[in-house]
């Protein structure tokens, strides 16, 4: 590595801070620790100055890539730009410094905000009641399916199966299985939508729910959704809406009006919290009236006059799904985002997201095959089988894009498309940026014939090039000594 990392800057005797030698009671504290709990050997920390530490972490931070540094067209993940005013709101001391155990009477402002956010999300989704508790999309899914199970069980209805389309996000079947259901896959038709005839065949009294994403992960709107809803409901099943990526529908169409009974949203995708790297998120669930008694404990009840309380007296609730009341910072950001956009702004979000995706598809559609006819919603999927025949896989194209300073789109998902490249330009990018991306894709397509090594060896300018990704994920080297040993064993 070109820049020495902190362990290599270590110099015996260097100090960043001077900790005074404790005296008095503090000086005796160490004596109170029983001998067997005391450290026997040196910690082995690097000996560095404050300046070394600052430069080390600042250098590392510059190796990161994020929505604040560049284009990030990661399909099904909505990596869009998040306005900083929302971070400002979340950082206000009245929100950021609240202790989770503080009595409700001392935080009326925060509780007002949460109640208003619940109301706004109910309005946006066309549902009747909302819980902000789940901490992620998959967590919202599990909460939703557990509520469906409890709702059916309350009627003495023990169903065994959940239906999931073959284009669904992997969390959907995983959720259904975790909730104790058998998962049955519904095939897509030639138009990339749920095959209604196949759904009718699978739909019987054993089916608890159909989990659906709309627009689906191919970026296509399920235009037969009303027939789908009718089919499921007629057989006594419920409809679950995966609303992880809701930017294509905001202010235009609502899951509640399409016939869905339970919805989750990803506030960390659609509503102004950046995501990736496992940071805090929120996956609120919204339900129709009939499912309201099953929402997680506790519920926020009250109003501005009477004040707010946590209601634990809800015998049919599925119980708690998370400590306290969710990730407050993420919830405040979502509220600030909704208020700053307003109803008109949300509609514009959806229109722009859809316009950008269709514009980009029109720019690259000559060079890259799009397996389903458009128009699409907020994203689209390309199939790079023709490129593969010429010697470059979807992965090669994705890696080469890094050389252009752009984050690669999602690859090899959804599974129903061969050599898939899944692109979501998002509503926040400029026309110039989208054009630059289209130009990069077109240039890469030419390089396949002119200079294929450029693709196979990409990326060229990053600190590491091609990684064995499966190995990196399963055996990550996170400690400096392990990393150093690995480096030395290779050189
Ligand atoms: C991201 C995503 C999820 C899961 O959300 P997490 O917060 O990562 O758990 C579920 N469904 C779809 C369609 C998604 O894009």
Image (tube, rainbow, N blue to C red):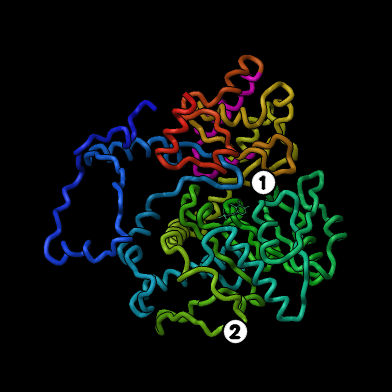
The mark nearer the N terminus, 2 or 1, is 1
Look at the numbered disc 2 and say if its residue's Cβ is closer than 8 Å to ligand 1: no
Q: Please provide the residue range marked out in magenta.
A: 422-448
Pinpoint residue 254: horizontal percent, then vertical percent. 63, 61
Residue picked out by circle 2: 315
Q: Residue 256: which quarter of the image? A: bottom right
From mark 2 to mark 1, how far is it between C-alphas? Answer: 40 Å
Task: Give whichever of 173, 430 is nearer the camera.
Answer: 173
User: Residue at horizontal 70%, vertical 25%?
Assistant: 387
- Judge whether 297 appears above or below 11 on screen: below
Residue count near mark 1 (Cα–Cα under 10 Å), binned few <14, some 14–19, many ≥20: many
Extreme-front residue of the structure:
35
User: Residue at horizontal 79%, vertical 58%?
Assistant: 184
**Residue 348 lies in the magenta stretch:** no
Task: Give whichever of 222, 262 is nearer the camera.
Answer: 262
Extreme-top residue of the structure:
450
Q: Quadrant of the N terminus?
A: top left
Find residue 165 and name its label: none
Pinpoint residue 164: horizontal percent, then vertical percent. 74, 57
Horizontal arrangement in the rendering, residue 239 relative to residue 25 (left or right):
right
**Residue 435 lies in the magenta stretch:** yes
Residue picked out by circle 1: 219
Horizontal arrangement in the rendering, residue 193 relative to residue 291 (left or right):
right
Residue count near mark 2 (Cα–Cα under 10 Å), binned few <14, some 14–19, many ≥20: few
User: Residue at horizontal 63%, vertical 38%?
Assistant: 411
In terms of secondary structure, where does tag 1 sit?
A: loop
Magenta: main secondary structure equals helix
The answer to whether any part of residue 144 appears in the image is yes
The answer to whether any part of residue 432 appears in the image is no
Pinpoint residue 114: horizontal percent, then vertical percent. 45, 69
Pinpoint residue 285: horizontal percent, then vertical percent. 58, 66
């Amino acid at each position: 590595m070109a820049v020495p990392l902190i362990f290599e800057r270590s110099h015996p005797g260097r100090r960043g801070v001077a900790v005074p030698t404790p005296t008095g009671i503090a000086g005796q504290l160490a004596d109170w620790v029983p001998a067997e709990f005391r450290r026997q050997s040196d910690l082995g920390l690097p000996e560095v100055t404050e300046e070394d530490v600052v430069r080390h972490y600042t250098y590392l931070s510059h190796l990161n890539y994020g929505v604040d540094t560049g284009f990030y067209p990661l399909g099904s993940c909505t990596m869009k730009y998040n306005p900083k005013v929302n971070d400002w709101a979340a950082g206000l001391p009245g929100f950021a410094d609240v202790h989770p155990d503080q009595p409700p009477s001392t935080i009326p402002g925060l509780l007002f905000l949460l109640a208003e956010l619940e109301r706004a999300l109910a309005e946006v989704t066309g549902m009747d009641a909302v819980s902000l508790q789940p901490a992620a999309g998959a967590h919202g899914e599990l909460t939703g399916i557990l509520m469906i199970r409890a709702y059916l069980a309350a009627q003495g209805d023990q169903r065994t199966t959940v239906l999931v389309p073959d284009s669904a996000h992997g969390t959907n079947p995983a959720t259904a299985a975790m909730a104790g259901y058998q998962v049955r896959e519904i095939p897509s038709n030639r138009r990339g939508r749920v095959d209604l005839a196949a759904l009718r065949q699978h739909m019987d009294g054993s089916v608890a729910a159909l989990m659906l994403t709309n627009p689906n992960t191919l970026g296509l709107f399920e235009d037969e959704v009303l027939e789908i809803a009718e089919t499921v409901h007629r057989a006594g099943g419920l409809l679950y809406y995966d609303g992880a990526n809701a930017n294509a529908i905001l202010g235009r169409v609502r899951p509640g009006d399409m016939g869905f009974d339970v919805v989750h949203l990803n506030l960390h995708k659609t509503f102004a919290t950046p995501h990736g790297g496992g940071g805090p998120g929120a996956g609120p669930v919204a339900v129709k009236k009939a499912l309201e008694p099953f929402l997680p404990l506790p519920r926020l009840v009250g109003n501005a006059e009477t004040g707010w309380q946590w209601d634990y007296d809800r015998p049919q609730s599925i119980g708690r799904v998370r400590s306290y009341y969710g990730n407050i910072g993420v919830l405040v950001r979502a509220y600030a985002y909704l208020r700053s956009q307003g109803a008109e702004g949300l509609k514009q979000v959806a229109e722009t997201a859809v316009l950008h995706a269709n514009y980009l598809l029109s720019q690259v559609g000559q060079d890259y095959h799009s397996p389903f006819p458009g128009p699409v919603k907020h994203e689209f999927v390309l199939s790079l089988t023709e490129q593969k025949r010429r010697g470059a896989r979807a992965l090669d194209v994705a890696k080469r894009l890094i050389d252009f300073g752009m984050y690669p789109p999602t690859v090899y998902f959804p599974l129903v498309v061969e050599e898939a490249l899944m692109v979501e330009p998002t509503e926040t990018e400029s026309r110039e940026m989208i054009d630059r991306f289209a130009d990069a894709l077109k240039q890469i397509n030419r390089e396949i014939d002119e200079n294929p090594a450029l693709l196979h060896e990409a990326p060229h300018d990053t600190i590491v090039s091609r990684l064995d990704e499966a190995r990196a994920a399963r055996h990550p080297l996170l400690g400096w000594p392990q990393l150093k040993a690995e480096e030395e064993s290779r050189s």
